Image (cartoon, grey):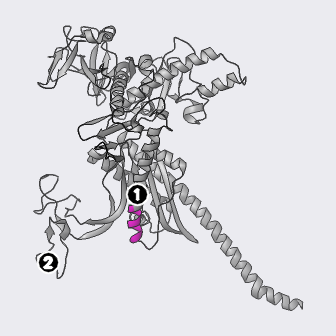
Amino acid sequence: MKLQNIMIIFLIIILPITMITSYYVGLQQDTIKTQTDYNYKMLLSTKQAIEAYEVNTVEWNAEYSRYADSKRRDILASINVFTTSFANSLNISGTTKDSLQTFIPAIMYNLYDGYYIYAPTYVPKVRTNSDGNALDINGNLIIDNPDSEIAYIKKNEGSPALGGQQYTTNIDEAEKEYKHILKSYISYSEKTSDLIANKETVINYTLDNYIKIYTKTEERSGYLINYSSNILKNDANPETLSENVYDSKTGILKQYGYLYSANKEKIYYGQDELSDNGYRFFKVVNDKIAYFPINCDVNGYNTVYKKITLLNTDGTTTTDLYQILNGNSSTIGKVYEYHEADGKYIETSTDDFSWLDSYKENVTLDYSAVNYYNEAVAFSKWAATLGIDFLKADNNNDPEDENSLFNEHKHEIMKESIINNLNLAISSYSAHSDYQYSLPIFTYDDWNKILNNISMTVFVQGIPIGLKYYNNYATAVSTKNNEHVNPEEIYYISDVDEYYHKKDCYAMNINNDNISIKGYRVTDFIEKAANDGNYRYYKHVGQDGSISSQACYYCAITNNRITYSEKLSQILNGECEGSISTLLQQIRKYQSEYNIAIARERYVQKKY
């Protein structure tokens, strides 16, 4: 073949194919690059949204889960952060947070005892004023008239209505619109039935081992624990707590002791010359110390009690005693029982509770951990009588063990509920979309995040990126909240260590009998700002600088800690030197404080 013919073939056939192939490969590269970029931006926006949620929950400003309208507002505000952040980060002309919603099949918020799904659906158009507030049929604000019915915009089924827009209180007559809404709260729950024994039980689960059980005859709730262990004998003792308190009235930062009152409110105490016993109790309101009155009636409005829960001899019930904190010399420290029939506190004899004698003189001790274990033992023993295998907590089914029968069963119930409801939401979305979308399969790590943490999961689909459409999901967890006590988010400090440590960190300095340690939730280690914005401090920095605000590099920063069990294994295998007896002593000391810290923080957290 002549060279001229070869050149013609190359120009007519080979060169165009090469150019097209090169262009296609370039598009593929651009698509992969864009997809990777979107993955990063979606995850970053999701994290920003969950951080926005934490801002509103870290101080317990809202009541819990489904009971509070404020919870829905927190979530909607967080969703607004995500859509705004993601839309801005895409840098696509015309992309706003409103237009972006067409690519969002669902957003899921997993809370302590259930979850919300934000997804599009048909909803009736509500009559509102210019500010978007709902009105009744007469044009009055619903918020000012809670007993009145919401008015809907009536469907125009023919000619335009005379006299302008017509309204109705009948939802079937209302005009509908397709929009994203935050759907009703869904609990992690199941119903079990035993037809032979004629038993029906409803169980509500949470992210940890707190459950609520309904039977045909009674309702009880509490923490399910392995009550066959020796944890009560070894660890359930009252404790002394302290933290820094800033008083904006005097401008002084000072360390005070504190405890939790009968209603789980944090009560501080300090020496005061006006107090008969050398202590004066107070609250901190808007960064100002507010002392409780000393002279008050036992059943008076201003009387403050702490609760002491004791396990009865039957093992399945408890007795609550109340110790007065702010009385005068004739009443302070005395123990009372509350008579619900007449609403009175009556002084009780402690002869039946002899162990209290060694503690009752010290009104500054906190009983949260004691109360937790005594209540949990009573509840767990009662739950075992229901005859449901996964509720029988013992050494073979420890609810604190993630591989226990209880946790495996609970997680299956939670998974099934989440998958079913997400499928319904996404199927409804796909039916009204030009693009067919289905629920992706969660990875093991993502399921672990969802089932064990307060979290947010965002689904995005159908955004054009070169040769295909962008479809993905992202999950971000919240660790800095006061709504769930994750054992991994309890930090520990000792009175000689300048760092705070995560669970089971061998770098924790507790190698001496005289060294004491305390565990607090992660939110206690966040720099705290005074309400006036002019002062910042840490709750657990020692007055002499002995305890720092610095996190342990190996555990809290890099999460690359050597655990006590790993260190013990290294010594036994001859991989390093060390005293086994000393290490075992450290392990016992840490484990004791771990049990107390978990018990205290779980006891005082708000329940659903």
Relative image position of residue 131 (x, y in whole percent): 23, 59
Asked whether 419 or 28 is in front, the reply is 419
Relative image position of residue 341 (x, y in whole percent): 12, 26
- Span shown in magenta: 424-442
- Look at label 2 and name its amino acid: Ala
| Between discs 1 and 2, the one toward the N terminus | 2
- Look at label 1 and name its amino acid: Asn
Label 2 sits on residue: 161
Badge 2 crowding class, 10 Å Cα cut-off, few under 14, some 14 to 19, many 20 or more, is few
499 versus 118 height, above or below: above
Relative image position of residue 388 (x, y in whole percent): 38, 38
Label 1 sits on residue: 420
- Of tags 1 and 2, the one toward the viewer is 1
- Is residue 193 part of the magenta span, yes or no? no
369 versus 133 height, above or below: above
Asked whether 485 or 211 is in front, the reply is 211
